[in-house]
Amino acid sequence: MKNIKEREELAALLFAAPQGGPAADAAYWEAHYPGRALPGGAVVTRLGPSPTGFVHLGNLFMATINRRLARQSGGVFYLRIEDTDQKREVEGAVPTLIESLAYFGIDFDEGVRLENGAAAEHGSYGPYFQSARRAIYHAFARKLLLEGKAYPCFLTEEEITQIREEQERNKRLPGIYGTYAKWRNAEFEEVEKRIRAGEPWVLRLDADAAWEAGETVPFTDGIRGGITFPRNVLDVVILKADGLPTYHFAHAVDDHLMGTTQVVRGEEWLSSVPIHLMLFAALGFAAPAYCHTALLMKIDEETGVKRKLSKRSDPELALSYYISEGYHPKAMEEYLLTVLNSNYEEWRLANPGADNEDFTVTTEKMGVSGILFDLQKLEDVSRDTLLTLPSKELAEFMIGWARARDAEDGTEIADVYTVQRDTLEKALDVGRGGEKPRKDLAYARQIAAFIGYFFDEFFRMEDPLPENIPEAEAEALLKDYLASYDHSDDRDMWFEKIRGIAEAHGYAPKPKDYKKEPERWKGHVGDVSAVIRRALTGRLNAPDIWEIQQILGERRVRERLTPRTA
């Protein structure tokens, strides 16, 4: 349909003007969304997830990058919900997404937010739900139709399947293009008849008319540098039969109107670049800077080979895994920065006490091959990060984590922590000071298990006695220890008493004597300490007994020792 009058009639059939008329024109929306007034060099980024209900590590990874790039440049970071594929939408997915990202400190300057637990929109460039922008997409689709760059296509699924099978037999590029695009130059009368008859249609972009490109398309990726792609020849769908846009079309329109300057996305989208550049050119828009990150990978435990993280096989792909285990947001951010920019670890070594907000993220320092997400490395980073947190802040985090677990499991851990806040803070500080602080606690669930014995509600006898000490002997040792116990003893006085009890019961006073003539002794003085440690903590391995006693207090120390002296 080369005749402009026919295209106008066709546009009137396909896109009935809404009340008010002007909103059917692309120019109306261009004026409705003016350019952003931002300082020079400011970057506008977005996170554009689909509300499928599965919030994954990739969402956090992309959010971390985009938030950094925007904030450090004085720009804008916004959340847009890309919900045009309504078959995949899951109820409650948007609040879950926002809450999960908020746990890790991800907030947005505009877009979709939570108000009283429900999704709400803030900002001058909305709606931020794509499903609510149908009139906008139709206006720009109408523009392409009027310019002869788009056409309605009535191919059925059966016809498309037949075309694909023929292409496979003839070893041709699969898709609708050239002679396979039978509706590209259809007669107006035939198209009009089918539309009036109510036949379903999709709107396709005419790849030959959309832009003037050569056989190849040069492209500069913000991470990968210069790349050359073959020109796109496919007549891609821009409006589906339900009237909603495809991802390709919607993102081009929205990124332009919302002023997005930089799009950071996974490398799985790299092959779509020719289509997207074609769409921007056809619409007359300047394309944003595209940056394609490497895929998140892991080392397969069975094969030892690096592979892509899988929703089906890897629970650590879900953000809920890290929230449930209780990884601290600062630890996760610190680790993500190490995999995000190759120079971050060097910067951290040179600036051990600095806030990581002082580090400038750049796309040039992002890797182009698979990004290895290493849980062990995350735990190492987390241990170091937790050591930097004051006990009051760590206690607040533990109470928040416990409250969430209580809601899920029906437990009352948070209440215990809250009532015994002083004990909690002291317990969290055990072993964290000195030149060689302990580094064996990485996340809240692990910490909760470790400090459980400080609270009577969680105290359990977990370990058996040392093999060389029978029950009666243990009771005798504890009886003597309790008789000599004075809560005001300092560390040295306390240890002298334990050594005296050990000698009185025939245990080696010094390690070197025990090693030279072990047959002379029942065991080592450490075995006596182990019996006391077990009585107080339920475990044979625990931090310094004297410090534990100071935190437990005299009453609880005596209570835990007394039943074992009967």
Image: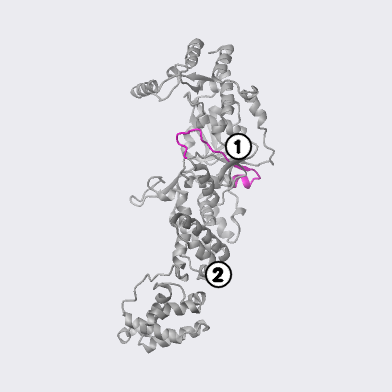
Per the image, label 2 sits on a secondary structure element best described as helix
Residue linked to disc 1: 260
Q: Position of residue 342 (x, y in %)?
A: 52, 50
Q: Residue at x 51, y 74 (%)?
A: 551
Asked which quadrant contains residue 129, the reply is: top right
The amino acid type of the residue labelled 2 equals Asp
Snapshot colouring: one colour
- Of the numbered discs 2 and 1, the one sitting upstream in the chain is 1
From this viewpoint, which residue is outermost toward the bottom?
Answer: 504
Per the image, label 1 sits on a secondary structure element best described as loop
In this view, the residue in front, 533 or 460, is 460
In this view, the residue in front, 359 or 476, is 476
Q: Residue at x 56, y 21 (%)?
A: 15
Q: Is residue 83 magenta?
A: yes
Q: Position of residue 337 (x, y in %)?
A: 53, 52
Residues in magenta?
68-90
